[in-house]
Image (tube, grey):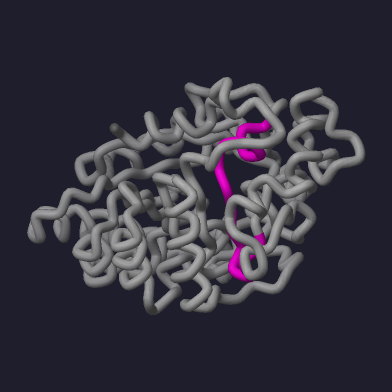
Amino acid sequence: MGITDRIDAVTKIAPAYLHAVLPPPRSVKVELTARCNYACSYCARSLRLRNQNDMERALFERIAVDIRKAGVEELGLFYLGESFMVPWLADAVAHAKAAGFPYVFLTTNGSLATPEKVSACMKAGLDSLKFSFNYADEVQFAAVTGVKDAYFRRSIEHIKGAHKARAEGGYKTGLYASYIAYDGEQGARMQAAVDEILPYVDEVYALPLYNQAGFAAAEEQASGWKPTAGNRGRLGALRDPLPCWAVFTEGHVTWEGKLSACCFDHDGRFHMGDLKTQSFMEAWNSAAYQTLRAAHLKKNVAGTPCENCVAYQ
């Protein structure tokens, strides 16, 4: 199964998940770190609306086992930060595989994903590595990320290095890339860059520009872009904004151990439970989560943490 098939399986809400009380989700993302070495204008993380730190290793190891025992099949070792900043990332992959996860995946901006680090993760059992490749050239890269334009070429070389590491090690890790279609011209503008990396990845797909739960909408619009409503998945398989799949089919754990109901919980308003004091399933079906899901099922999220998302305005 390719990455877009897996994405589509999560973003399409199956009938069994159209309820307030749910079975375990197929996928959970765990934030090993909230830190990132980029300050992208389209990402509200750079607004620093919450503390940004690393998850305690012991906490990760405990909750990973709990999440797997709950029945979750896919574990993402990232959320809103750049996980290659974590020194024990490969050990986290190994721990997740030892806990029994059939599929362990990771998304990176590529800047720190050296062949040595990538190879260590592949050796540990990483099933999927996706590069967020969101810039057409050095000029756009520097304008959006706020870091040196040299990192643009470095990320491309790291994609090529990952391909080489996989071949030399005989690993089966899927290699993927995605890019953001900022506006109607971005797809054409991205073509040369995509063509360069295409021989080194198994699949490339496009994403709409998300409004980050409304947090980054003003910054995005100031750049001349038009963010899409909510998180409707990938281009080519967009979902209805209500009910939002993120509330029903995927869990998101912050570095502090909070279970969040949103892909873009930049200030903590979407916290539904605390995995330091609750089991995963207790938090997954907490009273707060049930109330939020009921509102989504009625397609009326006024008065909930979701009401500020432009999807519902």
Q: Residue at x 74, y 35 (%)?
A: 293
Residue 298 appears in the figure: yes
Q: Residue 151: where, in percent of width, then height? A: 41, 65
Furthest residue in direction right, as rendered:
303
Q: Residue 194: where, in percent of width, then height? A: 34, 40
Task: Inspect the magenta stretch and tell me whether residue 253 lies in it.
Answer: yes
Q: Quadrant of residue 225?
A: top right
Q: Nearer the viewer, residue 3 or 162?
A: 3
Task: Inspect the magenta stretch and tell me whether residue 255 lies in it.
Answer: yes
Q: Residue at x 78, y 35 (%)?
A: 310
Residue 143 appears in the figure: no
Q: Nearer the viewer, residue 198 or 131?
A: 131
Question: For the magenta stretch, what is the residue range?
Answer: 244-258
Left or right of 285, for residue 148: left
| In the depicted structure, whether residue 163 falls above or below residue 86 | above
**From the image, which quarter does the N terminus lie in?**
top left
